[in-house]
Amino acid sequence: MSSASVPTADRKPRGSFGAGYFDKVWLPYGIAILAQLPMIVLYARELWSRPHYQFAPFAVLATCLIAYNRWPRDKQLKYYRSSWSVCLFVMGIVCCLAGYVFLSPWFSALSVMLLVSSLLARTVDSETGRGMSIASLPLYVALIIPNGGDYTLINWLQRLSASVTSSTLDIFGMNHHLSGTLIEIPGSRLYNIENACSGVQSFFTLLFVAIVFVIWERRPLFRSLVLIAAAVVWAVFMNSIRIIMIPVADYWWNVDLSVGFPHELLGYGTLTLGILLLLSTDQVLFFLFGSGNNPEQKTGRVSRLLSSMWSNLVEPRNEEQANSKRKNWRRPISKIGLYAIWSAAILILLAGAFQFVDVVRSYSRPKFSVQFFSTDVTKPFSQADLPLNMSTVGPGGEDLKWTQIDYRAQNRSRGSDLGLRSDTWIYETPARRLRSTISMDQTFPGWHELTTCYRNTGWKLTKRKLLYSTIEVDGDTVQWPYIEAHFQKDTGEYGFLLFSLFDAFGDPMWAPRNWGTLNSFFIRAQNRLTHRIRGSLFQSETYQTQAFVSQYGEFTQQAMDEIRSHFLVVREQLREEFLAKRAGKPLRETTPQKLKDEATKP
């Protein structure tokens, strides 16, 4: 008697791709990831410079081991359609392009993590029958917290560790004095928690171990969250033990555990004890709550939904459940989907090739930072570039005299918010009634909102408005906008600021009428573009002229008019001098003797 065979869900459906289906799926993912390898090298260099992220190679190894352990070796259909995978893939592509456009290794690292998650999300878990994107979760622990969040966490841990250590030393009856993160014990030496051990390495490492453990052991959601929270608690506790041991061992046994091999041994010992405490917490949770997989347990609707989603990711089903579920949703990747993946991979490869020169150039820098310009685009200015005595026409036609009393130049590091170089001239009116600081600031990647810099130094912005004046550019009369800003301090000091910008060709720079959160975001994003891209779409570099006057008491309208007329003349002189320097023909051929003669003129 013959029997018909029933096709299973794991058999290759009719019309799907033939042999080599595996290669056709992972290959574009591999291309997209390898195309970002130069950026990942920059990210890895930055990552390795932070000791609290030096577990990163183990995060990669853990993801590989989890994926290998759950790989569907006996399944013909190893990959399937997944909306979640598509979302992760699109986010990965967007982050990749952001990494290239802004030359940001952080975005590239996040892109690689998302692409790995996307590939694993459409890969069949050999036990659950679903995607195994959860296997990539350890990678995200090695993602640097943006905006210096990791160092903020370090500072918090330092203060917390110092406080706990101080309380414990009180219990032991050891006299000491706590000042910030410094602990001083009479008759001993000063212990610096900030320099000795903040324990942040143990914090990140224990957090990483907890995440790998709950994924490997397929712990339910509640138990996983408790274990991850316990990792934070045990990290702080073990770090406090580690710090306490240093002064105690030095005070009681004259053993120095603060440096060298004993310090490293103490760190690894407390870390090992922290891992054992984490495993012990898991056993306590098992004793109190059981396995946590009781389907009859009554919980809220949201709790059941979250638990169900987590269980689908980590917990294996029996064969009957797996077959009943997978036949309803598992379908092979369509041709359109595969072509889309390949197209995106080729796009990333081309973008990587376009930015390859900029990325490789960054290898020569000891520390990666945003480089707004590919070359030095500053022009050397000097005291002689502005006259020692100036006469400007006031608003009423009167002759206003200004005398230069000081000059100084300041160079800064690349990427500084204040520019790479500032040349400053100080001018005074007769009887020292007004003193104006004129500055030529170089160079910026686009519009530079100078009011933000003054606000960061303690000034309160009370008024900002956009004004226009006309100048001659190549025989045409054009408008050159400038910003007038009023400041005030609680001390009764008032500030009056005028500033404007021009580009590398001397053309006036557009100025925003208002400076709010939305337009500042877009302008800052534009300014962070790489030099080549920014130069093709917007201005490649801009130069700023400013005049600032401060005094006690409010400015009169006459004083503001005088400052304004002086600024409009000076900024045009600086622009013309810049163009002359750019052409290699300085306007003012001035020697020290000529400067002396000019200073003696009435």
Image (cartoon, rainbow, N blue to C red):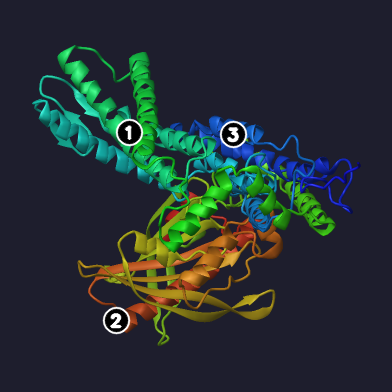
Q: Is residue 399 left or right of residue 373?
A: left
Residue 362 visible to an observer of this rendering: no
Decide which of 179, 241 is in the foreground and name it.
Answer: 241
Residue 198 is labelled as: 1
Residue name at image x 47 percent, y 66 percent = 449
Which part of the image, by quadrant, shows the C terminus? Answer: bottom left
Residue name at image x 74 percent, y 51 percent = 80
The amino acid beneath tag 3 is Val
Query: Pointer 2: residues within 10 angstroms few (<14), some, or many (20+)?
Result: few
**Residue 2 % position (x, y):** 91, 42
Disc 2 target residue: 556
Closer to the camera: disc 2 or disc 1? 1
Counting residues from the start of the chain, the first of labels 1 and 3 encountered is: 3
Residue name at image x 82 percent, y 47 percent = 6
Q: CA distance from mark 3 to mark 2?
A: 66 Å
Q: Is residue 125 left or right of residue 252?
A: right
Decide which of 381, 456 is in the foreground and name it.
Answer: 456
Disc 3 target residue: 60
Q: CA distance from mark 2 to mark 1?
A: 55 Å
Counting residues from the start of the chain, the first of labels 3 and 2 encountered is: 3
